[in-house]
Amino acid sequence: MIIEETGIEGLKVVKPQVFADARGYFFETYNEQRYFEAGIDYQFVQDNISSSQYGVVRGLHFQKPPYSQAKLVQVISGCVLDVAVDLRTDSPTYGKHFSVELTGENHWQFIIPRGFAHGFSVLSDEAVFTYKCDNLYNPKSEGGVRFDDPTLAIDWKIDLANAITSEKDTKHPFFTELEKLF
């Protein structure tokens, strides 16, 4: 596997080794020993899958301490623009974001440490998205930042006027209104 740094500490893109032939392909989506040897030492305790259609924006979500979560995310089919925003107030990249296109064809993964808001937009007709978390979900610890925040100026690669979002995601605070949690 190849691990690429993003310029934001802890945020990494993982490109697994894929073995393909006339039958299809095979690759390891996770191997604790190999990830630990590569310096990715999370103990994942929960796996999630979501399915969404074109134009859906999910996020920007996070879990407040002490229930914050690191994530290993990947697309099984389709294409998403995956985005992480650094919420760590002591970080030199506080308030900066990084985005990457994850697809069912490239098989890339995105490592998102604790202290980040996370979201994605669906760029294909449909996408199946999977992620591992290193802490259990706690509904009372939910937090979020507006996906359309002008300060963050994220290019979601879709027309936000037609974005499909949850009502909850439209009510998150803007970045400048966010409580300093990390």
Image (cartoon, grey):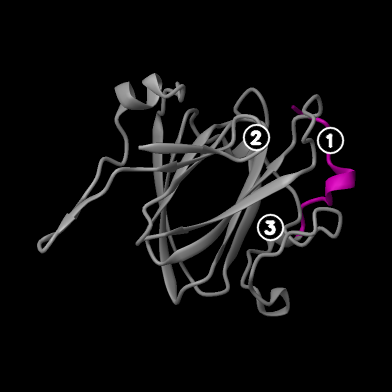
Q: Determine the residue positioned at 80% across, 42% down.
A: 95
The dot on residue 50 is: none
How many marks overall?
3
- Real-space CA distance between mark 2 and mark 3, rounded to the nearest whole angstrom: 14 Å
Q: Determine the residue positioned at 69% across, 58% down.
A: 169
User: Residue 154: where, in percent of width, then height?
Assistant: 73, 59
**Displayed quadrant of residue 37:** top left
Q: Which residue is mark 3?
A: 168
Q: Is residue 177 a member of the stretch shown in magenta?
A: yes
Query: Type of residue at label 2?
Result: Ser
Question: Front-most of 128 and 41?
Answer: 41
Magenta stretch, residue numbers: 171-182
Mark 3 closeness class: few <14, some 14–19, many ≥20 residues within 10 Å: few
Work out which quarter of the rendered image holds the N terminus and state it.
Answer: top left
In the rendered structure, are the residues bearing label 3 and label 1 in contact, judged by CB atoms less than 8 Å apart? no
**Displayed quadrant of residue 164:** bottom right
Query: Which tag is nearer the camera, tag 1 or tag 2?
Result: 1
User: Residue 174: where, in percent of width, then height?
Assistant: 84, 51
As helix, strand or loop, the secondary structure at mark 2 comes to helix
User: Residue 42: where, in percent of width, then height?
Assistant: 46, 24
Q: Which residue is mark 2?
A: 141
Q: Determine the residue positioned at 34% across, 43% down.
A: 16
Mark 2 closeness class: few <14, some 14–19, many ≥20 residues within 10 Å: few
Query: Type of residue at label 1?
Result: Glu
